[in-house]
Image (cartoon, rainbow, N blue to C red):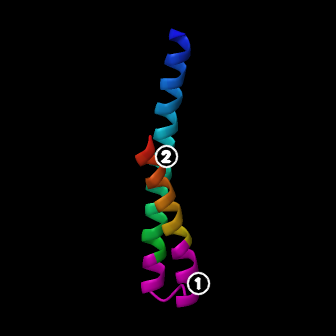
Amino acid sequence: MQQSSLITRLYLKDFYAKLYTSLKEASETEYWLELLHESGYVGEEAFSAIYQEIVKILVAITKHRGNG
């Protein structure tokens, strides 16, 4: 059982590291999208649609991270 517990802990550590990386990537995407919108390269309709999806991703990652 001890080896199984170690594997579980290592898996969870790796899983949360990947969640953290995903959160950073989504945050960076949000930044670039806002920059493109403010500079006029992305219109309001496209910005709103994409931004809403990014917010959903960030919320999902954050909620999952809080449950772990």
Q: Quadrant of residue 24?
A: bottom left
Q: Nearer the viewer, residue 43 or 45?
A: 45
Image x and y of residue 31, in percent: 42, 70
Query: At 49% across and 54% down in the image, what residue appears?
Result: 61
The question of residue 38 being in magenta is answered with yes
Image x and y of residue 60, in percent: 51, 57
Residue density around tag 2, few if under 14, some if 14–19, many if 20 or more, within 10 Å = some
Q: Where is mark 1, residue-wise?
A: 46
Q: Amino acid at mark 2?
A: Leu
Numbered badge on residue 8: none
Which SS does the magenta portion mostly show?
helix
Q: Nearer the viewer, residue 43 or 63?
A: 63
Query: At 44% across and 40% down in the image, what residue appears?
Result: 68
Query: At 48% across and 57% down in the image, what residue appears?
Result: 25
User: Which residues make up the magenta segment?
Assistant: 34-52
Quadrant of image for the N terminus: top right
Numbered badge on residue 19: 2
Image x and y of residue 49, in percent: 58, 80
Q: Amino acid at mark 1?
A: Ala
